[in-house]
Image (cartoon, rainbow, N blue to C red):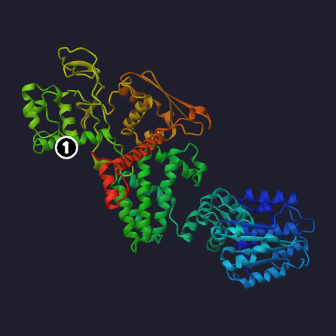
Amino acid sequence: MSYLVLARKWRPRVFDDVVGQDHVTRTLCNALAQDRVAHALLFTGSRGVGKTSCARILAKALNCQSGPTPNPCGTCPACVEITNGSSPDVLEIDGASNNGVEQVREIRESVKFLPSRGKRKMYIIDEVHMLTTAAFNALLKTLEEPPPHVLFVFATTEAHKIPDTILSRCQRFDFKRIPERKMVEAIAKVAAAEGVTVEPAALHHLAREAEGGMRDSLSLLDQVISFCGTTITEAQVREVLGIADRGILSSLADAIVEGDAQRALLQLEELHNYGADLQKFAAELVTHFRDLMVVKVCAEPARLVDVPDAELDRMASFVRQRSPAQLHRLFSAMMQGAEDVARSPFPKLALEMVVLRLCAQGPTLPLSEILTGLTRLEARLGDGGGGGGGGRMPTPESRPEAQAPRDVVPPSQTTSNAAARPESHLTLAARLLSSGGVPATVSAVREPAALRDPEVSQPPPLHVSPLIVHAPPAPCFEPTAEPSGQGCVGGDLTSVPLPFLVTDDEGAPLGKLESPFPQANLHDGRSATEHFAAFIEGVRGRDTFLAAHVKTEARLLHFDAERLIVVVTTTTDDDLQRASDSIEGWLKLFVGRPVSFTVERRPEGHADLAGETLSAREHRLDTERRAARIEAARQDPAVQIAVSLLGARIERVLPFAR
């Protein structure tokens, strides 16, 4: 007798044996118990998830001697014949090879006859999407009103190819991919019943390679048993299936994050010599970076990452000191690199270059550190290459133009300074660092375009009004050496943002830089929403992810000089609450005094959630501006003349670029 493979030997015999399809089996069992089984069913889903098996179990449930019953006995003649595939009343038809009108005509003729032995006649058409359009049309009338003893079950992996006229006549059941953890449990039971010992990590490899199909996992188990015998280790499974060691994935990720290009290349060379499929390994590395990102941002990653508990602990330890932005950049770069490796005729070389590019990315530096380094570099270039300075910022004595702030220059020097070349933001920052002066008009210092993250859309430059002076003219007070919140601005004493201290590599102070948050006047006539939007734009320069989260999730309830209250839904995560201390610190810079920040939660549909978010407000304002531009263009005399005389039409109206 020929060998019966495990996928056929352990095929489900009753609904309780079906793995991972509880939503389908429960519906069918209830329909059988209530005698509400439809005459046409459509089973759709990926390969090996139990579509045909459920159709056979349903046939046994309807034709069993004790049926119809949700639990067929499996021992009566009808059940035995259906299990063996020899029942004359249950016809399994291959839709790929019987896809013409002639085959459908034969079905139409045979449905008239009563079942030979059982109670119902069932037609199971596998890969039904392969039927031609004419065959589907020929089946419509029979499918809509079949004889009471006939039941149709269609199985397919591509339901989108089935005509709507067929879909509307069927009850549709979508079979899901089987979760990895449930598949591991099922494989372990089969292995134990076969007398085979399998390491837990090896079971995870088999389930992961099956990609959600139970039949594929049992076929792989059959193959591994033929190679290993009755004792299967994780290393043997990797050798048979040609997959990389999970330890190599972790080690390579460590080398990439640490920027150790040599160690990373040596590991790739070891994989290549081992004979691993590097294109497949690139895909596994993409999945590994995705899992690291999930472990970083989720409180319960075990629900989303299917790996053994020991490996999950290692991943949690790895991401503890990594920022989400760094992990996201690694995932995005590896995703694009994996596509290049898959298309390349030289996958090893392509993967090596991708890994080298990842190693060269380095850590994510705060914007303040980048600005400080650029300031030093520009200062050295301005001094002719920085010779003799040891790389430090020039002192006020070595740069006479930095003796006083730009806005308190004596009138006698106005003409010479006006003729000078305009200062860049970095030059202004460098001069302020060495002089300690504060200008009257505070501008937002933004990073150069070359340093911006290309994946994050940048907001327009902040428009900051001059500081409002309420005190009468008074003699100019010299600013203090230490940050005090006061400064000399145009001869008037006023409150200014506290400066940030900038230090060199050894931690020695270099000077002071103006705050990236312009100090707001909450009584300048603008609405609280406008002030809130201006504040979030300032937050965006310090934490892009947090600012985007506020703009898309939060609604403003209250904002004044004492408190800021926003409301979110009860399903929103706790990122805003965790960042409340940072937001309150930035609010102090923005308003000029301590301001409390509160996040309140409301259920969906609550009246407090009726207001628009900042993202919705931006979209609405953009739409209104676009409509205003179009209307203004239509009213323009020149446009009207062009339309009337030349037959022109308005295609689009672009905003005016200043």
* Secondary structure under the numbered disc 1 in the rendered image: helix
**Residue at 15% across / 42% down in the picture?**
380
Residue 213 picture location, percent across and down: 65, 66
In the picture, residue 163 is in which quadrant? Answer: bottom right
Foreground residue, 123 or 233?
A: 123
In the picture, residue 605 is in which quadrant? Answer: top right
Whether residue 11 is visible here, answered yes or no, is: no
**Residue at 35% across / 56% down in the picture?**
359
Whether residue 394 is visible here, answered yes or no, is: yes
- Left or right of 135 on screen, residue 557: left
Residue 154 picture location, percent across and down: 73, 71
Q: Residue furthest front?
A: 645
Q: Residue furthest bottom?
A: 102
Classify the position of the N terminus by image quarter.
bottom right
In the picture, residue 175 is in which quadrant? Answer: bottom right
- Left or right of 243 on screen, residue 476: left
Residue 332 picture location, percent across and down: 43, 56
| Three-letter code, disc 1 | Leu
The correct choice, above or below, for 476 with respect to 541 in the image is above
The correct choice, above or below, for 477 with respect to 230 in the image is above
**Residue at 70% across / 65% down in the picture?**
191
Q: Which residue is mark 1?
A: 377
- Left or right of 422 on screen, residue 81: right
The correct choice, above or below, for 513 with respect to 456 in the image is above
Classify the position of the C terminus by image quarter.
top left
Circle 1 Cα neighbour tier, 10 Å, few/some/many (<14 / 14–19 / ≥20)? some
Residue 559 picture location, percent across and down: 46, 26
How many circles with numbers are drawn on the protein?
A: 1
Foreground residue, 215 or 547?
A: 547
